């Protein structure tokens, strides 16, 4: 992801929209092309169509979830329909995601659960577009 104009709040908003249909490449391309463009912009991949870039966006999301790891990562994979057997309606995916965290689906949908997971994912994705090392403010030219 090289889109320097995107911020964490916008990524979080796009991820909230993505939850409804899931984050597999075809679903991203069809239902949340704005997330595809944020993660794999047309200017960075001019010879790629929305579906090719959807594949790249799915890879970015999977990478970020792997970085989060643990039960939160497993829950996100299920919520976003990226784990085997996690296709289907949102309610089913939420139930699977809640089970991983050993909580009820009604508790899972609260902002401090599902919402926080999406914030964690948004910030993990955002970290890929900022410099790895902070600038050296002591160096004067």
Image: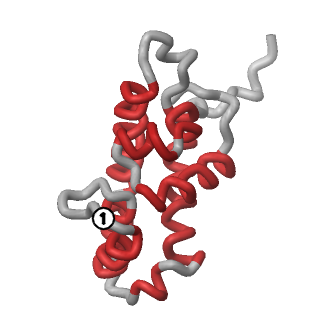
According to the picture, the residue beneath numbered tag 1 turns out to be 88
**In the rendered view, does 35 fall on the left or right side of 61?**
right
The answer to which quarter of the image holds residue 55 is top left
**In the rendered view, does 95 fall on the left or right side of 138?**
left
Q: Residue furthest right?
A: 140
Say if 35 sits above or below 129 in the image. below
- As helix, strand or loop, the secondary structure at mark 1 comes to loop
Which residue occupies 55% across, 31% down? 37
Residue in front for this viewpoint, 63 or 43: 43
Count every numbered label the image shows and give the total. Answer: 1
Say if 104 sits above or below 29 in the image. below
Does residue 77 show up? yes
Residue in front for this viewpoint, 117 or 18: 18
Q: Which image quarter holds the C terminus? A: top right
By what rule are the colours in the image chosen? secondary structure
User: Where does the image place residue 97, in percent across and percent down from the top left?
Assistant: 34, 73
Which residue occupies 30% across, 81% down? 99
**In the rendered view, does 88 fall on the left or right side of 37?**
left
Does residue 133 show up? no
User: Where does the image place residue 42, in percent across and percent down from the top left?
Assistant: 54, 20
Residue in front for this viewpoint, 10 or 21: 21
The answer to which quarter of the image holds residue 138 is top right
User: Where does the image place residue 67, in percent across and percent down from the top left?
Assistant: 37, 50
User: Where does the image place residue 71, in percent across and percent down from the top left?
Assistant: 32, 69
Q: Residues within 10 Å of mark 1 (few under 14, many from 20)?
A: few
Which residue occupies 37% across, 52% down? 65
Q: Residue furthest left?
A: 84
Which residue occupies 63% across, 54% down? 13
């Amino acid at each position: 992801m090289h889109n320097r104009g995107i911020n964490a709040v916008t990524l979080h908003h796009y991820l909230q929209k993505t939850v409804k249909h899931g984050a597999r490449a075809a679903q991203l391309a069809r239902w949340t092309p704005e997330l595809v463009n944020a993660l794999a912009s047309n200017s960075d991949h001019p010879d790629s169509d929305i579906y090719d870039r959807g594949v790249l966006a799915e890879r970015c999301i999977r990478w970020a979830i792997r970085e989060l790891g643990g039960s939160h990562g497993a829950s996100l994979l299920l919520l976003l329909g990226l784990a085997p057997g996690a296709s289907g309606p949102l309610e089913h995916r939420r139930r699977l995601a809640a089970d991983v965290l050993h909580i009820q689906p009604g508790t899972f949908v609260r902002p401090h659960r599902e919402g926080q997971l999406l914030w964690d994912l948004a910030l993990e994705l955002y970290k890929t577009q900022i410099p790895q090392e902070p600038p050296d403010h002591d160096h004067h030219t």
